[in-house]
Amino acid sequence: MHRTIGVNLRGLRVGEDHPHSRLTDTEVELMRRLHEDGMSYPQLADKFEVSVHCVGRICRYERRAQPAEREKRVHVPPA
């Protein structure tokens, strides 16, 4: 079975396709939108079940700021 993932120019996984990612790309965008609308870092941390530090880095575009430059097909072993 194969799956399509997003990678950067170096071919490394980015966004929700990164193996250590806890949030989907949709959740990250929602988090940033809610922060722009006035929700605090601690409120967002509770809502998304991540640390305040993680929320801050995402909302300041220090994390999850790199878009997928292209797609790559990878093999997914059966479960």
Image (tube, rainbow, N blue to C red):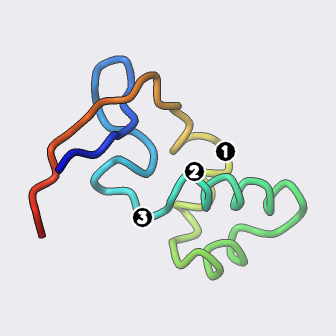
In this view, the residue in front, 25 or 2, is: 2
For disc 2, the marked residue is: 57
The secondary element bearing badge 3 is classed as loop
From the image, state whether disc 3 or disc 2 is nearer to you.
3
Determine whether, in the image, residue 24 is placed left or right of residue 18.
Answer: right
Quarter holding the C terminus is: bottom left
The residue carrying pointer 2 sits among few (fewer than 14), some (14 to 19) or many (20 or more) residues within 10 Å by Cα, namely: few
**Is residue 2 placed above or below 54 in the rendered structure?**
above
> Which mark sits nearer the N-terminus, 1 or 3?
3
Determine whether, in the image, residue 51 is placed left or right of residue 20.
Answer: right
Which amino acid, mark 1?
Arg
Residue at x 33% of width, y 47% of height? 18
For disc 3, the marked residue is: 22
Residue at x 66% of width, y 44% of height? 60
Q: Position of residue 56 (x, y in %)?
A: 62, 56
Alpha carbons under labels 1 and 3: distance apart: 18 Å
The secondary element bearing badge 2 is classed as helix
The secondary element bearing badge 1 is classed as loop
Residue at x 61% of width, y 61% of height? 27
**Is residue 23 placed above or below 36 in the rendered structure?**
below
Q: Residue furthest front?
A: 1
The answer to whether mark 1 and mark 2 are in CB contact below 8 A is yes
For disc 1, the marked residue is: 60
Q: Position of residue 1 (x, y in %)?
A: 17, 50
Q: Would you identify the image quadrant in which residue 41 lies?
A: bottom right
**Is residue 74 placed above or below 44 in the rendered structure?**
above
Alpha carbons under labels 3 and 2: distance apart: 14 Å
